[in-house]
Image (cartoon, rainbow, N blue to C red):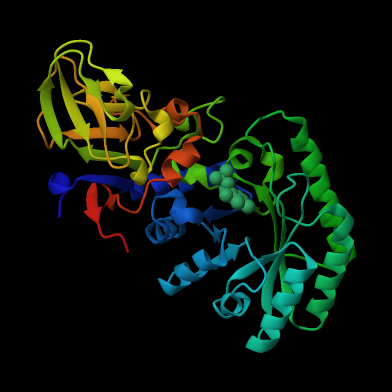
C-alpha cells in the first residue's frame, strides 16, 4: 500500500537511523555503542530500529523494561541486550534464559536474579547500577560496598557474572553543569569500590546522547545514546541535529480530511478559542491528542500545508485539529506535514516541543499506535518487521 490512501502515517527513515549510528560511533571511537530502543524506539518502532542499529554497528541494545527486551528476543533479535527497570517478581528467569543482561541496583534484585539463575540452571549476566547523583534508580554510594560484595559472592557461587557497571547522568544536557564532573568522579569511585570487591566487568558505561556528543570523558567502554539515534538533538540550546551530523528519522504527516470555505467570525474547534478573522478556508488535519499531537500545542503547533507553515487554529481535539489556510487553496487528500527533518520546509519535532512547552523526546515518543509506521530505506518502502 502506498500512503495516498492513508489518513496519517509516521515515516521512519532507516537510512537516516543507520547514518546516525555511524555518526555517533565516530563521536566515541574508543567505545562500543548501545542503541537505546526503549519505548518502542522512542515511538519509531522497536524491532526495525533495533535491526537497523545493529546493521550500522551498534554492539548492544538497551531497553528500560524486561518486557521490551523479551519482545526483541521474541522477534528474533540477537546480540547483547541490557534492560534496567525491574520491579519485584519481574521476569528474571525468562530474561536469564533469553540471554538478556539484567540490571541490579539493590540487594532485593540481586536475590531475585540469583534465585532465577538457580532455577534456570545457568549463570545470569548482571550489570550493577550506581546512583552517582541522579537520585532516580541505582545504588547509593553508602550501599554500594555491600551490593558489590554480595554480587562478588554470587559470582564465586557461579550464579551470576557481573558483566557491567554503569550509571546515568542528571544534567548532561546542560554542558558545563557542575553536577557533571561530580557524577563522573562518583562513578570513578564506584568503579574503584567494585574493583576492590573483586569485580572485573566487561563494560563500564555512563553516556546518554548528550554525554556521547559533548563529553568524551564519559565514554568509557560503551555509550548509550537514545534520542540522538533518532536524529533529535539532546542539547537544542547548543546545536540542532545537523550540527552533530544527525538527521531526524521520523516524519509525521496526514491527509487533509476536509477543506471548506467559512465566513468571517466563525468559531473553530472546542471552546471557540480561534475565530476566523474574515472569510477564509479551513483545512482539517485528522490527527489529535489520541495520536500524540499535544493538546498543549493548541493555537501554537506548526504544520506545513499547501507549501506554508500554518498554526493549529484553536484546540487540538482527540482525533483532529484545524488550520486556517487564509486565501490559499487546498484539496481533501493534500498532505499536511507536522514535522520531519525540515528540508522540505516542514517543522521539526523540536518546533513542536517549543510550541507545546516540552522536549522533542516527548513529541516523538507519544505518537500513538493509531498512526501506522511506514518504513523507508534508501528512499523505498520496506516492510517493518
Ligand atoms: C533513556 C536512557 C538512555 C538514553 O538517553 P538519551 O538521552 O535518549 O540518549 C540512556 N540510559 C538510560 C539508563 C536511559 O534510561
Name the spot of residue 5 as percent of width and height, x first: 13, 47
Residue at coordinates 52% horizontally, 26% vertically from top-left? 239
Q: In which quarter of the image is residue 143?
A: bottom right
Please name whichever residue, 202 or 211, is drawn nearer the observer in this view of the structure: 211
Find the residue positioned furthest to the top. Answer: 278
Please name whichever residue, 358 or 25, is drawn nearer the observer in this view of the structure: 358
Residue 121 visible in the current orientation = no
Q: In this view, does 40 lie to the left or right of 299?
A: right
Residue at coordinates 43% horizontally, 39% vertically from top-left? 363
Please name whichever residue, 109 or 268, is drawn nearer the observer in this view of the structure: 268
Q: In this view, does 347 lie to the left or right of 220?
A: left
Total tally of numbered discs in the picture: 0
Name the spot of residue 266 as percent of width and height, x first: 20, 18
Q: Quadrant of residue 146?
A: bottom right
Q: Quadrant of residue 364?
A: top left
Name the spot of residue 93 as percent of width and height, x first: 61, 80
Q: Quadrant of the image for the N terminus?
A: bottom left
Residue at coordinates 26% horizontally, 46% vertically from top-left? 9
Residue at coordinates 74% horizontally, 56% vertically from top-left? 138
Residue 100 visible in the current orientation = yes
User: Does 258 sit above or below residue 85?
Assistant: above
Find the residue positioned furthest to the front. Answer: 271
Q: In this view, does 356 lie to the left or right of 103?
A: left
Q: Quadrant of the image for the C terminus?
A: bottom left
Name the spot of residue 222 as percent of width and height, x first: 63, 54
Q: Is residue 56 left or right of residue 299?
A: right
Amino acid at each position: 500500500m502506498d500512503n495516498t490512501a492513508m489518513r496519517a502515517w509516521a515515516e521512519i527513515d532507516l537510512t537516516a537511523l543507520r547514518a546516525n549510528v555511524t555518526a555517533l560511533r565516530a563521536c566515541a571511537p574508543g567505545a562500543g555503542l548501545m542503541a537505546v530502543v526503549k519505548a518502542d524506539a522512542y515511538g519509531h518502532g522497536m524491532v526495525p530500529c533495533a535491526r537497523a542499529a545493529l546493521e550500522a554497528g551498534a554492539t548492544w541494545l538497551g531497553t528500560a523494561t524486561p518486557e521490551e527486551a523479551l519482545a526483541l528476543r521474541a522477534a528474533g533479535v540477537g546480540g547483547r541486550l541490557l534492560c534496567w527497570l525491574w520491579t519485584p517478581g519481574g521476569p528474571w528467569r525468562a530474561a536469564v534464559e533469553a540471554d538478556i543482561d539484567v540490571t541490579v541496583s539493590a540487594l532485593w534484585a540481586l536475590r531475585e536474579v540469583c534465585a532465577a539463575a538457580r532455577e534456570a540452571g545457568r549463570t545470569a549476566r548482571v550489570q550493577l547500577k550506581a546512583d552517582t547523583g541522579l537520585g532516580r534508580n541505582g545504588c547509593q554510594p553508602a550501599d554500594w560496598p555491600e551490593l558489590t560484595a554480595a554480587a562478588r559472592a554470587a559470582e564465586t557461587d557461579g550464579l551470576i557474572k557481573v558483566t557491567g557497571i554503569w550509571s546515568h547522568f542528571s544534567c548532561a544536557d546542560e554542558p558545563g553543569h557542575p553536577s557533571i564532573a561530580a557524577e563522573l568522579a562518583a562513578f570513578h569511585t564506584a568503579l574503584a569500590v567494585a574493583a576492590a570487591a573483586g569485580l572485573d566487568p566487561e563494560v563500564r558505561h555512563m553516556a546518554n546522547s548528550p554525554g556521547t556528543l559533548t563529553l568524551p570523558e564519559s565514554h568509557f567502554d560503551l555509550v548509550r545514546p537514545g534520542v540522538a539515534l533518532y536524529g533529535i538533538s539532546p542539547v537544542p540550546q547548543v546545536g540542532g541535529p545537523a550540527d552533530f551530523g544527525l538527521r531526524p528519522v521520523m516524519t509525521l504527516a496526514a491527509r487533509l480530511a476536509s477543506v471548506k470555505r467559512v465566513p468571517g467570525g466563525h468559531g473553530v474547534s472546542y471552546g471557540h478559542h480561534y475565530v476566523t478573522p474574515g472569510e477564509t478556508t479551513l483545512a482539517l488535519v485528522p490527527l489529535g491528542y489520541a495520536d500524540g499531537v499535544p493538546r498543549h500545542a493548541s493555537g501554537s503547533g506548526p504544520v506545513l500545508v499547501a507549501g506554508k507553515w500554518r498554526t493549529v487554529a484553536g484546540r487540538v481535539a482527540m482525533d483532529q485539529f484545524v488550520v486556517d489556510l487564509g486565501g490559499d487553496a487546498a484539496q481533501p487528500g493534500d498532505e499536511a506535514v507536522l514535522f520531519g527533518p525540515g528540508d522540505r520546509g516542514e517543522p521539526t519535532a523540536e518546533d513542536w516541543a517549543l510550541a507545546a512547552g516540552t522536549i522533542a523526546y516527548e513529541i516523538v515518543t507519544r505518537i500513538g499506535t493509531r498512526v501506522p509506521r511506514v518504513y523507508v530505506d534508501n528512499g523505498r518502502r520496506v516492510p517493518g518487521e
